[in-house]
Amino acid sequence: MIDIHTHILPGVDDGLQDIGEALLMAEDAASQGVRAMVATPHLYWHGRQALSAAQIRHGVGDLNTLIQAKGVPVEILPGCEIPLQAELLERLQRDEWMSLGDSGRAVLVEPPWGEWLPYGKAVLQNLLEAGWMVVLAHPERHVFFQRNLSLLEELVQMGVHLQVSTGSLIAGRSEPAAARCAYELMERRLVSVVASDCHGIKRRRCDLGEAAELLKRSYGQHVAQMLTTNVPRALLRGERVDLQQVWRNVPTDNSRWKKILRAVLRRQTDDG
Ligand SMILES: [Fe+2]
């Protein structure tokens, strides 16, 4: 599996704070079958200087040296989580920011946490027209998307890929509204990729293996593998991703997914 959204690079944002924790996170991920993780730190974090692409490349290099020395079979790739903003394309073109894996044409874009931006669609459209592949980070966690799924449908029709977070799918790890939205997006076949967005080694840990098992039980082996391995790999290589291929052969069964969601929400309540 390949986890395209992680905060494993230590000491730069609200993710891990020291290199020992990063090693533990890599070991945990490896034990679940994750073979590559893209470090996607926030570019701006309170009280810290803005991160540059050069700093991220350097930090990831150091981290890989340590992980290899310890014999952990995971490769860390450089990347970043880019906030949706007006000058996004220009800053990418100036090489201030980087693509996922620093290898191709796919970028991870974080929607705003307040209101949707009036120019949001235009920014994403400009990126797509300039040849970038756009992955929208965890839309199911944002209230304006939860209330406006048709906006997400429009974005997917434009060619934007939706990344749902593992925590929104696994019982007890998210707000019920995020879980509801995540499963609704799954049922509408709008999700291209699942990633952990891991921030810690206990809370918000890398649980992609656990999510893959759950996806397999809910939607079958093909979808589980596409969402956690094949699509992430295609994005890193800059290869086209076809949503119909991702979701092929999965029957629409309203009662089935509602049953899954009910179980997730029930366990969330039980877990407190
Ligand atoms: Fe993130």
Image (cartoon, rainbow, N blue to C red):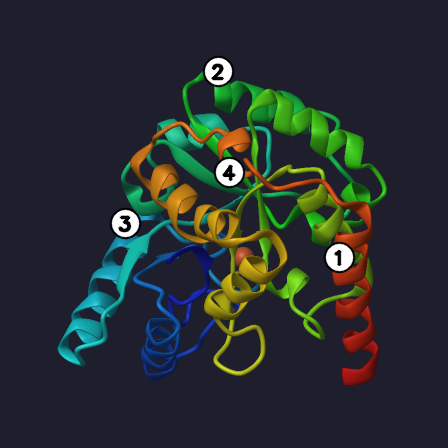
Looking at the picture, how far across and down is residue 77, in whole percent?
29, 54
First of labels 3, 1 by sequence position:
3
The residue pinned by badge 2 equals 129
Q: What residue type is labelled 2?
A: Glu
How far apart, in angstroms, are the residues tagged by discs 1 and 2?
A: 30 Å
257 lies left or right of 82: right
Q: Which amino acid does label 1 sit on?
A: Ala
Q: Are the residues at dot 1 and dot 2 in contact (C-beta closer than 8 Å)? A: no
Q: Residues within 10 Å of mark 3 (few under 14, many from 20)?
A: few
Q: How crowded is mark 1: few (under 14 residues within 10 Å), some or many (20 or more)?
A: many
How far apart, in angstroms, are the residues tagged by discs 2 and 4?
A: 23 Å
Whether the residue carrying mark 4 lies under 8 Å from ligand 1 is answered with no
Q: Are the residues at dot 2 and dot 4 in contact (C-beta closer than 8 Å)? A: no
First of labels 2, 4 by sequence position:
2
The residue pinned by badge 3 equals 54
How far apart, in angstroms, are the residues tagged by discs 3 and 1?
A: 34 Å
Looking at the picture, how far across and down is residue 81, in whole percent?
49, 49
